[in-house]
Amino acid sequence: MNRINSKLIQSTLAALLVASSAVFAADEAKDFSSRIGVVNSERIFKESNMAKASQAKLQAEFAKREKELRDDAQKIKTAAEKLDKDAAVMPDAERVRKQRELADADRELQRKQREFTEDVNQRSFEERSKIAQKANQALKVVAEQRKLDLIVQEAAYVSPKIEVTDDVIKALNNLR
């Protein structure tokens, strides 16, 4: 009987311990969640003034090369259409020569397009890095203002209470 009571007391104490731990954990989670913020970094890279200025700067920087590539592509297309139309009445040697010229021009255009894409990607990365650096400063400002312990990027679900993206964008827009 004493043994049964002892086991009953132990299991009751264990249940009380688990229940009190759950209550304590819920209180801690409630307290901790109020110190968490979530930010959507892609919105920062699209909506901040710095991001918009960066995008305009990149477009201006690469507009001329982009137009040249489009013009070159149009010239090759026009030449290919002309060759297709005239190929039946052309001597074989001239047709083969023009086909080679077109193939060479197309390869050169593809090379230029690859270089252009690499240059655009490199510059975009550089600009995003600048924005990210400033955004981190803005994140710290928002964290201090809201007394946050943690700011998380990208979450599957975000309660509007802990969403801080708008505040970070405002802080970033105010940084210089």
Image (spheres, helix red, strand yellow):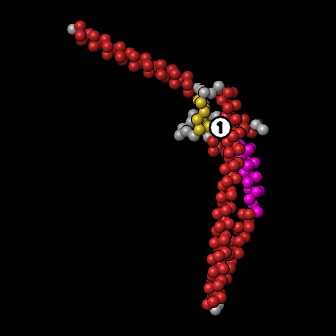
Check disc 1 and report the residue beneath it: 165
Q: Nearer the viewer, residue 29 or 100?
A: 100
Q: Residue 137: x and y, percent?
A: 70, 35
The quadrant in which residue 107 appears is bottom right
- Report the amino acid beneath label 1: Thr
Image quarter where the C terminus lies is top right
The residue sitting at the top extreme is: 2
Q: Residue 122: x and y, percent?
A: 67, 54
Q: Residue at x 69, y 40 (%)?
A: 133
**Residues in magenta, as a range:** 47-64
- What SS does tag 1 mark? helix
Q: Residue at x 74, y 44 (%)?
A: 49
Q: Residue 152: x and y, percent?
A: 58, 35
How busy is the neighbourhood of tag 1: few (under 14 within 10 Å), some, or many (20 plus)?
Answer: many
Location of residue 51 with respect to 75 vertically, above or below: above
Magenta stretch holds residue 52:
yes
Magenta stretch holds residue 172:
no
Q: Residue at x 72, y 63 (%)?
A: 66
